[in-house]
Amino acid sequence: MKRLALLLVAILCLPIPSPAAECLVPPRVSQGHAFPVSVTDGAPFDVRVRWRGETLLIPAAQKPGEKVWKAEILLAMPMDARGKHTLSLSTGGVDRAFVISSVAVPWPESILKVAPKYVEPPREVMAQINRDSKRSREALALRTEKAWTLPLQRPVPGGVTSPFGGRRVFNGKPRAPHKGTDMRSPEGAKVVAAADGTVVLAEPQYFGGNMVHIDHGQGVISTYAHLSSFDVTAGQSVRKGEVIGRSGSTGRVTGPHLHFGLLVQGVAVDAMPLLNDPPQIVGGPSRSIFDSQPTAKTPRSPR
Ligand SMILES: [Zn+2]
């Protein structure tokens, strides 16, 4: 009898692949959107996630008072992704493949006027620009443990003045699309962290001005640009909603505002849909407060 009980215990403790693990994967995601994927099971496990050339190993966690173990990851559908893409999830030796279709987004165009030195930067600042992009690349390459939670906290209360994804023309010259969201925020107003994380960068940069990057784990990084001052330093842990700096007009700007960016494994995504609960993963583009008003038709005078 005792032997049988021991045998039973031994069998129960074997790491058996669990085909019962439940995967939550959206079938469609809009371009430039981040989307959460989760795997839930009754026992601890790791899941190997393969998405668009990158592999991440995600350990399942158990929330206090809950029976199930859940592994959660945030992934990105790039702005220019077209067609169908395969997500592979492997747990306990079982591979599952999911097809996710990208939904096209009609990105808007914005025409901006800034100081000429930000369109054709003078030669003496090229060293700084190169150093800035090296520092940002290092931050974006981080893959730490999950600290992000959804929905994200809105970093400033003001509305969107220039949405994510707009193809931008600076002083008549086409430049890269807008890789963040500009939000109305007066000089000196508080800017708060979108989620828990670690400050990986808090320094002046050429285009971004005074810039903060926060690592939220799994390659999820939020960025805050054009600040007038810093309330945090690199290496510091921050909680969702904690003040990290004050908004301002440093760097390439037309006036004081917050440029709020979100990168997911190095891919720029629109952060605005993640402020909703549940997150909006199909839709867009995000609109600005100026778009929501009907455009006044100015009568043309004959010339
Ligand atoms: Zn911006």
Image: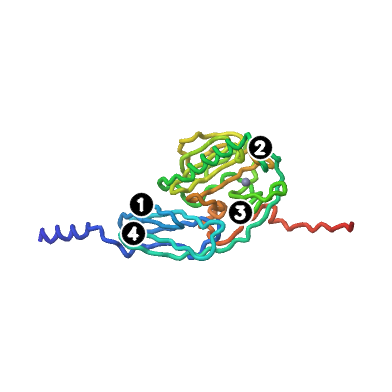
Above or below 98: residue 277: above
User: Quadrant location of the C terminus?
Assistant: bottom right
Question: Circles 1 and 3: CB distance less than 8 Å?
Answer: no
Q: Which mark is residue 59?
A: 1
Q: Amino acid at mark 3?
A: Gly
Q: Mark 3 CB in 8 Å range of ligand 1? A: no
Apparent side of residue 297 relative to residue 169 in the rendered image (left or right)? right
Helix, strand, or loop for circle 1? strand
Q: Amino acid at mark 1?
A: Pro
Sequence order check: which comes first, mark 2 or mark 3? 2
State the count of labels: 4
Instruction: Measuring from the top left, give residue 38's x and y in whole percent.
Output: 41, 58
Looking at this view, is 116 or 13 the one in front? 116
Helix, strand, or loop for circle 2? loop
Q: Mark 4 CB in 8 Å range of ligand 1? A: no
Q: Residues within 10 Å of mark 1 (few under 14, many from 20)?
A: some
Q: Amino acid at mark 2?
A: Pro
Looking at this view, is 132 or 161 the one in front? 132
Mark 4 — residue? 91
Residue at screen point 52% across, 45% down? 222
Mark 2 — residue? 122
Instruction: Measuring from the top left, give residue 150's x and y in whole percent.
Output: 48, 52
